[in-house]
Amino acid sequence: MRLASIITLSTALLLTTGPVMPEEAPAPADASSAQSRPAIDVLELFTSQGCDSCPPADDVLSKFAERPNVIALTMPVDIWDYLGWKDTLASEKNSERQRVYAKTRGDGAIYTPQIIVNGMLGVMGSDARAVEQAVSITNQALYGARIPVRFWHDRNTLKVEAAAAPAGHRYKEATVWFAVIQKRAEVPIEHGENKGKTIVYTNIVREMLPVGSWNGEALSLQLTRTAVMRPETDAAVVLLQEGKAGPIIGAAWMGLW
């Protein structure tokens, strides 16, 4: 897919327009059935405990997380730690992911709160209407191009399947990301811009690792559950993303306990 041209068109449109938890292995992923299922939209909120404009965005993300066809992820970053409060959930890997997104898009926009929609468009995280518009725009851009992904566990093994590319579509090599999730956290802020507030976070990414590559052929992966999970996490997400920060063309969510 041509990310640069999609973003140029999508940005113009944006400016002019005002989980399932399977315990048994599902049927093999089938690209021909992609159109029969609702698209799974992935929202990544880059937020910080040291950012006084972030709490409204944290609330917006929690509302989107209630939708069955949305994977809404909180990506705490450390870019505001110097303001007097060190984010207790932040990861330098999340900050780096945001930087790579900005470089890939070519706009250099790095700020909080920022929601990246389907790996393609960045919008103000507290603006629910802008998020809705970005979802609509990226769905149009990805129509017919999404890849079914299946994800389940069998005892101590996590199994991932991604279908083959549909006929007539070309893709860059895609990264298979595995993320471990803490579904909820309440954090009392003692210093900095949000001093005195207790902020609730939803679906916090505690670790995101590349676990494989997809080149258009059907793919199966197995991961050892104990090797990838962390004590505070209770869910996991698999993302199929062109390059390392391109369009997200497939996604799956699963609770683990």
Image (cartoon, rainbow, N blue to C red):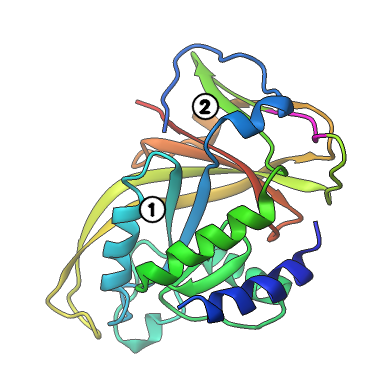
Q: Quadrant of the C terminus?
A: top left
Q: Position of residue 148 (x, y in %)?
A: 65, 32
* Dot 1: element: strand
Prevailing secondary structure class for the magenta stretch in the rendered image: loop
Identify the image quadrant of residue 234.
Answer: top left
Q: Amino acid at mark 1?
A: Ile
Q: Quadrant of the N terminus?
A: bottom right
The residue located at (71%, 57%) in the rendering is: 244
Q: Nearer the viewer, mark 1 or mark 2?
A: 1
Q: Which residues are magenta?
A: 162-166
Nearest the viewer among 241 and 181 is 241
The residue located at (70%, 59%) in the rendering is: 246
Identify the image quadrant of residue 82.
Answer: bottom left
- Left or right of 49 in this view: 124: right
Instruction: Give the residue number, with chain letter if any, for mark 2.
Output: 225
Q: Position of residue 185 (x, y in %)?
A: 25, 53
